[in-house]
Amino acid sequence: MSKKNKDKLERNRSDHKITVDSIIKIYKRGKIEVVALRSLSCVFNPGEITVVMGPSGCGKTTLLNLIGGLDRPTSGKIIVHNKNICEYSDKQLEKFRRDKVGYVFQFMNLIPELNASENIGLPLLLADKPKSKRKKRIDELLDMVGLTERGEHKPDELSGGEQQRVAVAAALANNPDILLCDEPTGELDTSSKNNILTLLREIIKNYPEKIIVIVTHDLDLKEIADRLFYIKDGVMSHELSREDIEKEITAKGQQGPRKNDIPKKVMQELRELEYLIKKKIERLEDEFK
């Protein structure tokens, strides 16, 4: 690649990155104020998968919602395509969410009455895409996620892993620059989880202009991370590059589990189990309301 093209590519990366600058988010519950994020700053680059981890309640999902325009910060800036989305009107934010952001959630959020093709095509329909273009895009996405033969099946006729692949395809329908994933493997078995990890890695490989941000408790997602952010008590605790992650994995593999590490690992697993049980209970409560 020529120096001119390299410089152009670098400028494009710089223009398309997400810069979170000194974000503070305070929730008010009656007379009580809860500080979710405390002057947090970080950068998300195109062509990278960034995994955000930390204990429950640390502010991970809040950060995801702010980046995606689902919520507004109390103060600070979020710069996307050189524009501060915190200054957007409600209408501008709606357009930003529709055109620039795709969402993948733990519980898939598929519409049960629609089949896989219809769930994938819904964002295209809402964006007023012509029928012929919708059909072509749906076929492309079904092929991408390996579900060409399952397009006519409704969610309850698909496995959990297949449902999540449909959800990923729906999130990509309008070709967004940003893909935000909230616990995308939380409800999946090991085989289905590995399929989703492979799919996310393939997406960033084939579409290096995109940014993927994943919030999770699942330590296995380190395998596909280009960078790893740890949040604690609403602030950035530390950051690891891909090289740092590989060194950490290698070092642990060489040393094996030390006696003092075992209780920490058990506590981590118990915290993750507690989180999953809590989410299950909330989901069941919502279903029976």
Image (cartoon, rainbow, N blue to C red):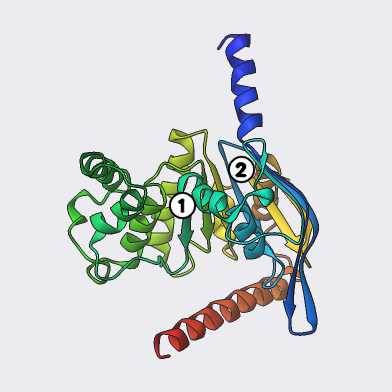
* Rendered residue at 24%/65% (across/down): 114
Classify the position of the N terminus by image quarter: top right
The quadrant where residue 44 appears:
top right
Residue 271 vs residue 18, the one in the foreground = 18
Is tag 2's residue or tag 1's residue first in the polypeptide sequence?
1
Task: Please indicate, yes or no, whether residue 29 appears anywhere in the rendered image.
Answer: yes
Give the alpha-carbon distance from disc 2 to disc 1, as whole Å. 13 Å
| Above or below, 251 relative to 287 | above
* Mark 2 nearby-residue class (10 Å; few <14, some 14–19, many ≥20): many
Residue at screen point 43% across, 60% down? 193
Up/down of 260 relative to 215, above or below: below
In the picture, measured across the screen, residue 172 lies left or right of residue 59, that is left
Q: Answer yes or no: do the residues labelled 2 and 1 have beta carbons within 8 Å?
A: no
Position of 139 compared to 185: left or right? left
- Residue 30 in which image quadrant: bottom right
What residue did someone put label 1 on? 197
Confirm whether residue 250 shows in the render. Answer: no
Q: Which residue is mark 2?
A: 226
Q: Residue at x 41, y 52 (%)?
A: 171
Amino acid type, residue under disc 2 in the picture: Asp
Crowding at dot 1, Cα within 10 Å, few <14 / some 14-19 / many 20+, comes out as some
